[in-house]
Amino acid sequence: MEKVTVSIITIGDELLIGQVVDTNSAWMAQQLNKAGLWVQHRAAVGDDEDDIWNALDEEGKRSDIILITGGLGPTADDITKPLLCKYFGGKLVMHEPTLQHVTYLFEHIFKRPMPMLDRNRRQAEVPDVCTVLPNKLGTAPGMLFEKNGKIFISMPGVPQEMKGIMTDVVLPLLKERFKLPYIGHRTLITFGVGESMLAEQIKDWEEALPPFIKLAYLPNYGMVRLRLTASGEQNIIDKTLDEEFAKLKSLVKAVLVVDEDITLEQLIGRLLKQRNKTLSTAESCTGGYIAHLITAVPGASAYFKGSVVSYDNSIKQNVLHVKEDTLQSVGAVSEETVREMIKGVLPLMQTDYAVAVSGIMGPDGGTPEKPVGTVWIAVGNSEKTEAKKLQFRFDRAKNIELTAMNALNMLRIFILENS
């Protein structure tokens, strides 16, 4: 069974200057891979007709399917639709079902006080050589073209609209059109050991892997994801992947966090729900970021009660009841302070577990005794509290991320050991 290959073209000056981060390509690649399609190239181009035209030419030579996002809005800088019309040799015509949909959105959903503008009506114009793909969440429809045996699909750059068209129309269409191979994955996550050390630890096993299995190392914020991938006959692939994955788990068991591709915050939620326990946080240097990660997981209300962002020492004292003597003698960034933050937030929030952090994220605020990147983390329950000092050496954003990940991992271990 041959690979069916995909190229992704994202369009917009904002992507090239870093004003907007391209999350579309990552999401699309994940969904395509699950479906058995291989993304072999991604290209980002600005709002320039020649650049877009050249990208279409190049990717049309490279892949079976070319997915395009962006440039379909109602303003002058959105040039994708007229360019596609020219590229595929068509002319713009009004698509009545899309016009009815756009009219419905403006009159019944958006409920704008002014009449719909002509530029909004023109969102329903499409090249007469395309197949229109309905966009339930927005005004710009998707468009499918075929040229030289290749499929080109253009979608809006708005992530929610693109995801809707991909899920409802594009993926089912591609699965029906192509005979796709089975692609199997097995993923585990480790914490606290570097990528190179991990590679050395599993070197002999990795060298003995069957040639049709690929191993990928994906490091991020103190963690390393190890992913096995293979494609082919499903029964054979699944059996071999399961055998090799079992060997891998045994080799890394000392640093293994979870044997599936989920986040730490998802795992924390699962552990708490399984035990019918609750959690709160007392955050200083992370400014509520740990609470944000936890509550980004659907269903977090079942186990997360709340957070005290005690950024100022007065909040530590007046809300969390950290002693004034503690703050004056050893300071806010200290073991004593985070332990007292745990002691204060548990009864305040009436939770079974709590996490507390206090540190110096930078770029300034450090001292010779407590340089930038110094962090104290505590986790605990009503019976026991554990604390740890860490020293990071990165910029403010990464120091906050690392603090949060280490705090969640400490909490994971504490829950498992103190259930």
Image (cartoon, rainbow, N blue to C red):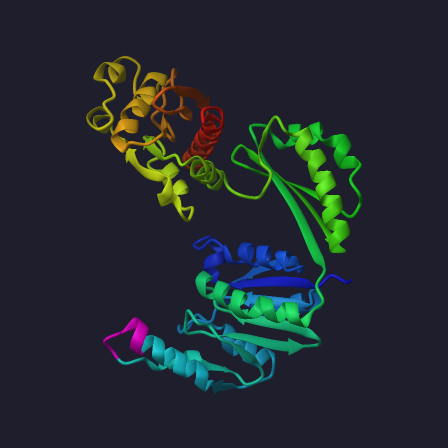
Quick check: 80 above or below 157? Answer: below
Quadrant position of residue 9: bottom right
Which span is picked out in magenta?
A: 107-114
Residue name at image x 42 percent, y 46 percent: 297
Quadrant position of residue 27: bottom right
Q: Nearer the viewer, residue 74 or 222?
A: 222
Q: Nearer the viewer, residue 275 or 257?
A: 275
Q: Position of residue 130 (x, y in %)?
A: 57, 81
Which quadrant: the C terminus? Answer: top left
Q: Position of residue 171 (x, y in %)?
A: 59, 66
Q: Is residue 149 left or right of residue 114?
A: right
Q: Nearer the viewer, residue 362 or 3?
A: 3
Which quadrant: the N terminus? Answer: bottom right
Q: Is residue 320 left or right of residue 253?
A: left
Task: Judge whether residue 86 is colored magenta.
Answer: no
Quick check: 116 above or below 37? Answer: below
Quick check: 120 above or below 39? Answer: below
Q: Position of residue 265 (x, y in %)?
A: 46, 39
Quadrant position of residue 60: bottom right
Q: Position of residue 262 (x, y in %)?
A: 53, 43
> Is residue 19 visible from the viewing direction of this image?
yes
Q: Is residue 34 left or right of residue 391?
A: right
Residue name at image x 74 percent, y 46 percent: 239
Residue name at image x 30 percent, y 76 percent: 108
